[in-house]
Image (cartoon, rainbow, N blue to C red):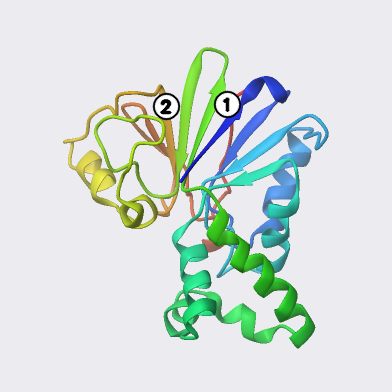
Amino acid sequence: MYQRIDGDGWRHIYIVGDLHGCLSKMVTQLKAHHFDPWQDLIISVGDVIDRGPDSPGCLALLDKRWFRAVRGNHEEMAVDALEQGDRMLWVMNGGDWFRGLSEPCQARVSERLRHCSELPLIIELHTGRKTLVVAHADYPSSHYAWNKQVDKHRLVWSRERLNRHMQGKGENITGADEFYFGHTPLKEAAHYHNQHYIDTGAVFGNRLTLVQVQ
């Protein structure tokens, strides 16, 4: 469930919002930041696939040493579809791109998608004196702790905490300095207490959010 990253092994570290197949938007951002794949690292909040123009290209990022990701609900839907043989939910939520691939390409992509089940649900990043936590939708507890057992479904699906923030009822999550989430497309990145919501709906024509944290 958890993966730990030591920032000392990298020069610059960025956290990127939901890609949803928008590979070219990320490439444009990386060029603007003079990204160096030999020294720098990107951490994704999940949902690298579906809806956008290049899901296979974004999925291939998971093979790169400079790219890490937590599992999003779209990766969950894809894995479930392949394992259970029922693709209706996935197709309804943007997984129809898979049907348009050639059979050899489907085989290669299927293998990569199955590996998504091995992605962590939580990444803990140590940078400087800070502890940063990345999850797709939420960290469903008021206190963070390494290897603490929390609800896996809420990690990738829940919007309860964000809704409370929007109602003015939010609060800090203790145990870490900052938390980064995606999942809910917003017009602009939102920041509540020590939590940052950075899915800005790149696949819907908005800007892709890339945050430099080191």
Q: Report whether residue 115 is seen.
A: yes
For disc 2, the marked residue is: 178
27 above or below 128?
Answer: below
Decide: few, some or many residues near mark 1? Use Cα within 10 Å; few <14, some 14-19, many ≥20.
Answer: some
Q: Earlier in the sequence, mark 2 or mark 1?
A: 2
**Left or right of residue 168: residue 154:** right
Question: In the orientation shown, which residue stands out farthest toward the top?
Answer: 129
24 above or below 67?
Answer: below
**Left or right of residue 6: residue 78:** left
Q: Residue at x 81, y 34 (%)?
A: 36
Where residue 214 sits: x, y (%)?
A: 62, 23
Mark 2–mark 1 Cα distance, whole angstroms, equals: 10 Å
Q: Residue at x 77, y 35 (%)?
A: 35
Q: Quadrant of residue 112?
A: bottom right
Decide: few, some or many residues near mark 2? Use Cα within 10 Å; few <14, some 14-19, many ≥20.
Answer: some
**Viewer-side residue, 102 vs 33:** 102
For disc 1, the marked residue is: 213
Amino acid type of the residue tagged 2 in the rendering: Glu
Q: Residue at x 42, y 54 (%)?
A: 183
